């Protein structure tokens, strides 16, 4: 659906070859689609508000505040207000443009969502609040579900469908909540690495990370957290919005992605992160990231 809409948009012809921008504005959200038709380097992108970027097609090299990073489909790149990156387009060409979409969101909207999360899924009191883990400059591989959500939001702009206001309102809220929850999870993991004994949940996360490839032992996690099974499941789901088993699977896949980026063989990675079957690993990896492990490895080491 999105590719068809993009093809129609491109029939008008580009106004410029590098970062040809089409802007759509609805309510308090600005969405831009950038097509680049020729190789280029050191192209600046700055953010006035929180800027959520997602690749649709092709590859960029982002020179961020901290490092140079490859940016490909199924990845998110977030810029905080006032920050800037430089971008290289090594693969862009007329017949196959490099395409990225950005969603610019008022900081107040982020603050409101943080307040909602504070009510629904508060972080442990001794670790801070959601407002303290709101997005700064951040780069991560996102799930297939997030990619589908991004494409649905973009398609609603491009097609001007009857329900576009609803799609935008609920879709952008969902997108930002996904971003905040993932950012919050990484914040908690960092706390667990820094001080595993800070509280019961950092101790649980540290133990799970140290035994990622092993079968999940719920009784052991309950002992570590000093909670009953029912209390542990309730607390874990409120904080991470998933069950311990789902969390373990997601962390195994995240670790697998890191190992594949280093060029390790798919079979070795599958067993190293705790899968008993390479086919099961490949199926789960594709379900999560929208690409096979072998394809991801090929893109990462190219």
Image (cartoon, grey):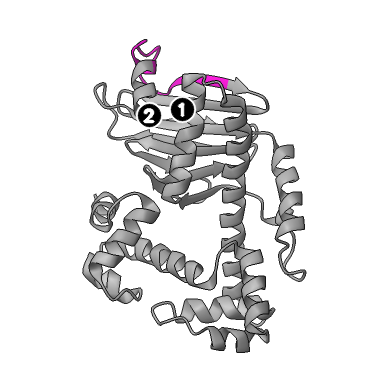
Specify the segment rendered in magenta. 9-24
Is residue 130 visible from the viewing direction of this image? yes
Q: Quadrant of residue 11?
A: top left
In the picture of the structure, the residue carrying the numbered disc 1 is 155
For the question of whether residue 63 can be seen, the reply is no
Few, some or many residues within 10 Å of mark 1 (<14, 14–19, 20+)? many
Q: Left or right? Give the position of 96 relative to 21.
A: left
Q: Position of residue 190 (x, y in %)?
A: 58, 68
Helix, strand or loop status at disc 2: loop
Q: Residue at point 27% right, 54% down?
A: 292
State whether residue 264 is above or below residue 92.
Answer: below
Picture layout, residue 171 above or below residue 242: above
Residue 36 picture location, percent across and down? 36, 25
Q: Is residue 221 above or below residue 25?
A: below
In which quadrant of the rendered image does the N terminus lie? top left
Residue at point 62% right, 89% down?
A: 223
Q: Quadrant of residue 91?
A: top left
For disc 2, the marked residue is 1
């Amino acid at each position: 659906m999105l590719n068809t809409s993009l093809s129609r948009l491109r029939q008008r012809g580009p106004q410029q070859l590098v970062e040809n921008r089409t802007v759509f504005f609805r309510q308090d959200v600005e969405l831009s689609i950038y097509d680049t038709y020729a190789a280029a380097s050191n192209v600046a992108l700055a953010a006035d508000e929180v800027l959520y970027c997602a690749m649709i097609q092709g590859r960029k090299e982002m020179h961020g505040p901290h490092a140079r990073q490859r940016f490909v489909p199924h990845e998110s790149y977030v810029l905080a207000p006032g920050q800037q990156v430089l971008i290289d387009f090594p693969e862009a060409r007329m017949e196959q443009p490099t395409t990225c979409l950005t969603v610019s969101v008022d900081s107040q909207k982020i603050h409101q969502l943080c307040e909602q999360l504070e009510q629904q899924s508060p972080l442990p009191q001794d670790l801070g609040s959601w407002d303290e883990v709101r997005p700064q400059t951040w780069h991560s591989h996102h799930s297939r579900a997030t990619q589908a959500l991004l494409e649905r939001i973009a398609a609603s702009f491009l097609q001007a469908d009857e329900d576009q206001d609803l799609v935008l309102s609920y879709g952008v809220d969902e997108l930002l909540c996904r971003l905040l929850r993932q950012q919050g999870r990484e914040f908690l993991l960092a706390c667990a690495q820094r001080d595993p004994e800070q509280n019961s949940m950092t101790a649980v996360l540290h133990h799970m990370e140290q035994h990622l490839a092993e079968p999940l032992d719920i009784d052991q996690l309950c002992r570590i957290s000093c909670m009953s099974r029912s209390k542990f499941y309730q607390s874990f789901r409120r904080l991470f919005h998933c069950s311990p088993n789902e969390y373990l699977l997601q962390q195994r896949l995240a670790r697998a992605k890191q190992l594949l980026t280093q060029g390790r063989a798919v079979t070795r990675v599958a067993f190293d992160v705790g899968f008993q079957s390479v086919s099961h690993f490949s199926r789960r990896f594709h379900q999560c990231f929208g690409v096979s492990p072998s394809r991801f490895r090929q893109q990462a080491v190219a």
